[in-house]
Image: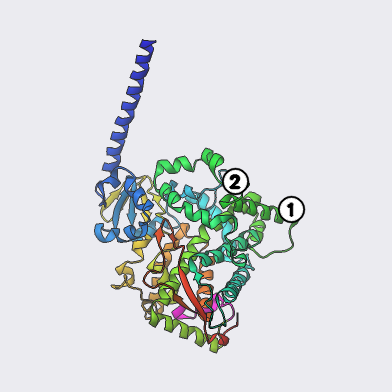
Amino acid sequence: MEVAGFYLILILIIVAASFLIWLLFSGVWSYRRLCHIPTPSRLAGLSYLWLGYITWSGKQYWVHRDLHKKYGPLVRIGPNEVMTDDPEILKKVASTNSTYRRAEWYLTGRFNPYFDNLFTILDPIPHQKAKQRSMPAYLGRETPGLDVIINDKVKLLIKVLCDRHLTSDPGQNPPLVNLGVITNYFTMDVITHLGFGHETGYLRDDQDHYRFLEGVRRLWPQMSTVSEVPWMRRALFSTPMLKLFGPKHTDKEGFGALMGAAREHVNRRFELGEGKKSDMLETFIKLGFNRQECESEGLFLLLSGTESTACAMRQILVHAITAPAIYDMVKEEIMRACREGSVSYPITMVEAKKLPCLQAIIYEGIRMRPPLLGTFPKVVPSSGETFHGHFIPAGTSICTNGSSLLRSKTLFGNDAEVYNPMRFIHLEKSKREEMERNVELTFGYGQWMCAGKTIAFMEMNKVIFELLRHFNIQLVDPLKPCDVKSYGVFLEPNLYVRITKDQNVSLGVKA
């Protein structure tokens, strides 16, 4: 027994020593592959501690934004990750004919162990086929009710604000508006109606149904950090782990509860028909999607199109209302359009595109802070790649730095650090459109462009215009508008504003 115990201990020592030797040599090999690329920390070349710490700290946006000022167009942020803000590199990586594939980072968008969605399909060819199949629904060509559904939610938003946050009694102080909440309620109602045929009722009930938003916000720090650390990502988002610990349709709260509601609505549509509908769910069915695919697409819409669009709306509004000259300029443009009778209620996209000041504050608001902060890595193909004189070996992940790209002086002028919507207004048409396309890089490019981009711009244009048409808006605390943390998205739970009715609203349409 003593001999057997001795050999067991010896075997364990050999195994442990072998593992440590392998760990050392693999670390050295990994470090040397990209040691010629500048890095903010030697630790970033050896482990994921630096990247994980920056993500967990809530300072992701500010650190990423300033990386390329210090280290150039290519920066090593992990053992196998190189980040860039060079638009030409990003366009090449994402072009239609590119052989780059998505990195496993995207698997953190998996919420169902049995089905992939557009976000989690990694290889270009299967992704292109899936995207081509579903795009008619996203672009509105096959979804005639897309505009109608968004319009209904815009009207509901204006009604809710008028009913709950305005008063005709000068002695009363109506409740403040929490933009950090109500923008999310709006996008949730839009997406649940589009994807499942029924709005959940966030705006109507002034309630976080299933405590979904609370749960998602609580999990953002963990999920964002896990997404950047490969061994944690592979463990937590593996099929066995998702089956055991992932959200379930039977959950009473959180994402699982919403999955259950989605399944119920999809099953009802397939079984009963519910008459002729004009939403995206009906379009998916017409395109040949089965029940599971319809459910998966609707949930993908929720993940990709709620927090990001709400975040964009908030930053567009806050930047505009804190710049008096810009605020007055866009308000005058809106009132002039109302006086001339050139805008509907709610405004259409065709009408909105004819308002240069409105377009300027939307694009400049997005430019000041990207709605999403993910690294969106793509894998260098087998031939390797050379960028800016540096060879990038096959298998390296090329990461997007949208935070830095949108502050590029090359793309946006020497005052790129300053909020200045006039940069779009003073340009001739071709130059302005080029600058707008550079801002839109934050939604992806080429084969990897965000499928819901059209929907997001419809929501932003309609909501921003109608809020500024109907109300005067001011921050409650200009010196500290809210608490802000960045974990893949911006979390702003307490962004309070005070609204009053614009005295010229009768020129437009009464709420």
Q: Amino acid at mark 2?
A: Lys
The correct choice, above or below, for 472 with respect to 190 in the image is below
Residue bearing mark 2: 248
User: Crowding at label 1, few (<14), some or many (≥20) Cα neighbours within 10 Å?
Assistant: few
Q: Is residue 349 magenta?
A: yes
- The mark found on residue 271 in the picture is 1
Residue 178, horizontal then vertical, whole percent: 50, 68
For the point 38% across and 12% down, the residue is: 4
The correct choice, above or below, for 421 with respect to 367 in the image is below
Residue 250, horizontal then vertical, whole percent: 63, 46
Q: Is residue 290 visible?
A: no
Contact between labelled residues 2 and 1, with CB atoms less than 8 Å apart: no
Specify start and end residues of the magenta stretch as a single range.
344-358
Quadrant where the image shows the C terminus: bottom right
Residue 312, horizontal then vertical, whole percent: 46, 67
The correct choice, above or below, for 443 with respect to 175 in the image is above
User: Crowding at label 2, few (<14), some or many (≥20) Cα neighbours within 10 Å?
Assistant: many
Residue 407, horizontal then vertical, whole percent: 33, 67
